[in-house]
Amino acid sequence: MKKFEIPDFYRSPIISRVKQKRKLDDPRKKDFSPTVLDFDNVKFRVARHFGFCYGVENAIEIAYRALEENKGKNIYLLSQMIHNPGVNDDLQAHGIQFVQDTNGKQLVSWDKITDQDIVIIPAFGATLEIMDLLRKKGVNIEQYNTTCPFVEKVWNRSEKLGQDKHTIIIHGKHNHEETRATFSHSSQNGTSLVVKNMKETKVLASYILGSIDKEMLLAFFDGKFSNDFDPEKDLDRIGVVNQTTMLATETQEITDYLRSVMIQKFGEATIKNHIADTRDTLCYATNENQSATYGLMETEADLAIVVGGYNSSNTTHLVELLEQKFPTYFINSEAEIKSIDEIHSFNIHSKKLEIKKGALSKDKITVAITSGASCPDAVIDKVMQRILELKKATKTIDEVIGEVLVN
């Protein structure tokens, strides 16, 4: 796999060595059990897969190359590069200006951008409308396009579905940048509809099976379907694609459920005419990170820590999984570990930071730890170092890493 040129401060002395060891021991990525780092009074269970994926490293490399190659020019990024505050803050500190926020609110007027400026397309991609607007201005949008290849894979699959007269069901959050981009692309090729979860999918199924009427369906999905969507004729042939940061297991669950619904309506014999096989659109990195999280859940720990941006979809899903078993703390950096008795943790349900007491107070603790695909390994290092400092660990990092490397 390609080795990316990203700033050294994103890399780490602890995690990079652990990852390299696991890669050598398990090149086919069949073992999802965590790595154990035992500091005697602190034991970390480190997820097999986490942190920067191919798409994120690619985007960061391109963004910093744009800075290096265009000194003195205005450099714009359509929205946050990825959902990680440290990465985005650093890009802004280097002079990059964000054109929109994550919800699509304009921060820099389009009128201000000219053909002399540099515009970076973020890893989530961009809508066709924005790309057309920039082309008309004469902006070279291909030069620094960091759209993740796996997002583009979803777009290509959507195009094929549309050509084959399937309605494209997008499993995603309709206001997320990636889903907005995917919806824009898919709507150019075929009728499209966004479902967030199984609850919304069951509403769609209720219409397919005749339990609710057209008006109820359209009201429920208001703002989440393409202009040409007519449920009376557009739900005989469907295909499911996803926002790549959603839970892969949930996407598959939704697909399997809709397949059973289509069998119920049309019968098994002709099912291939009514729902497409789209398993090939699931992102490998999201899949691996989630599988590694399940690997963590097969072990025992006193608590779990998930590190990443609070608006990161893929990171949020890791929290959802881990909190089923462990007291789980969602932090964006080591700064949220205030003391041995206090962690400031983001609640994914209330969307607020909460003060949690006593997480690290036991004499000996075992911590399950992972991060989202947009979190630098260096941040995980700092979180671990902060805990070791507070607990006054009796072994050094070099000692423990040395033990791991020789085993």
Image (spheres, rainbow, N blue to C red):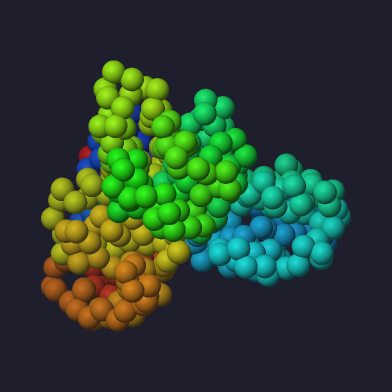
In the picture provided, is 107 more to the left or to the right than 338? right
Residue 140's x, y, as percent? 79, 46
Residue 314 x/y as whole percent: 40, 53
Q: Residue placed at 30% from the left, 60% from the top?
A: 319
What is the number of callouts on the image? 0
Query: Where residue 261 sits in the image (x, y, percent)?
Result: 28, 36
Asked if residue 138 can be seen in this view, the reply is yes
Residue 13 seen in this snapshot = no
The x, y position of residue 25, in whole percent, is: 30, 33
Viewer-proximal residue among 357 and 138? 138
For the point 54% across and 32% down, the residue is 162
Residue 111 picture quarter? bottom right
- Name above or below for residue 106 compared with residue 67: below
Quadrant in which residue 149 is drawn: top right
**Viewer-closest of 297 and 134:** 134
Residue closest to the eye, 34 or 112: 112
Measuring 32% from the left and 50% from the top, which residue is drawn there? Answer: 212
Say which quadrant the C terminus sits in: top left
